């Protein structure tokens, strides 16, 4: 059995794409996942599954949720080592003391032609960002609620992304053991 971390994008945000965590657990268990635990309502799950099943899970999960709830969320399934590596590569260690200001965007693939100049043009002076492989780091001391950089990052990176603040990343690492 292999430990996996599933990150869901855009569920239970702003009253849209509602999926209670109990239903998410049931979906994952129906797909053969075991020891399923969720963290906060925005779509984070840690579980074990047969190693050969892991690559197929994102599509199977999307389809199961579509059948159950009528929408198809983006799902990234990561291994604990990927979370650990993202934490090791954090280019903004000074931000970990204020974990709500540091965001880690996990990308579906490595961007082939990211628009770094476009990202730079969206950035306000207090914000910093860095793209390292399939991870986009954003330090936004003023918050991401009104950040043009946070809002425009995925489009300029050119690949699907789902982001978590540093506190959530640390918690998921801990849950994955």
Image: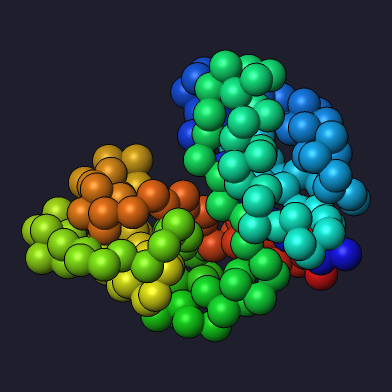
Residue at image location 75% in from the left, 55% down from the top: 53
- From the viewer's perspective, tell me whether residue 17 is left or right of residue 77: left
155, above or below 21, in the image? below
State the image quarter where residue 55 is shown.
bottom right
Q: Position of residue 161 (x, y in %)?
A: 41, 52
Residue at image location 11% in from the left, 58% down from the top: 118
Residue at image location 53% in from the left, 29% down from the top: 72
Is residue 103 in view from this perspective?
no
109, above or below 71, in the image? below
| Towards the viewer: 63 or 158 | 63
Is residue 146 in view from this perspective?
yes
What count of labels does the image hold? 0
State the image quarter where residue 158 is shown.
bottom left
139, above or below 163, in the image? below
Quadrant of the image containing the N terminus? bottom right
Q: Position of residue 167 (x, y in %)?
A: 60, 59
Quadrant of the image containing the C terminus? bottom right
Residue at image location 14% in from the left, 54% down from the top: 122
Q: Position of residue 74 (x, y in %)?
A: 50, 40
| Towards the viewer: 155 or 38 | 155
Q: Position of residue 67 (x, y in %)?
A: 65, 20
- From the viewer's perspective, tell me whether residue 96 is left or right of residue 160: right
Q: Give the image's coloring scheme.
A: rainbow
- From the viewer's perspective, tell me whether residue 107 is left or right of residue 43: left
| Towards the viewer: 96 or 158 | 158
State the image quarter where residue 27 is shown.
top right
């Amino acid at each position: 059995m292999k430990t996996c971390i599933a990150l869901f994008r855009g569920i239970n945000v702003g009253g849209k794409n509602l999926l209670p965590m109990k239903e998410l657990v049931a979906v994952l268990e129906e797909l053969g996942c075991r020891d399923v635990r969720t963290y906060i309502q925005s779509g984070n799950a840690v579980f074990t599954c047969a190693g050969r099943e892991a690559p197929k899970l994102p599509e199977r999960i999307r389809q199961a949720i579509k059948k159950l709830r009528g929408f198809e969320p983006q799902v990234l399934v990561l291994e604990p080592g990927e979370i650990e590596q993202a934490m090791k590569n954090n280019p903004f260690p000074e931000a970990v003391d204020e974990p709500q200001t540091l965001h880690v965007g996990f990308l579906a693939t490595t961007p082939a032609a990211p628009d770094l100049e476009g990202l730079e043009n969206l950035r306000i002076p207090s914000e910093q960002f860095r793209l390292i492989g399939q991870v986009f780091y954003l330090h936004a001391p003023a918050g991401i609620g009104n950040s043009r950089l946070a809002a425009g990052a995925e489009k300029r990176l050119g690949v699907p992304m789902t982001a978590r603040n540093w506190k959530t990343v640390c918690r998921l690492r801990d849950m994955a053991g």
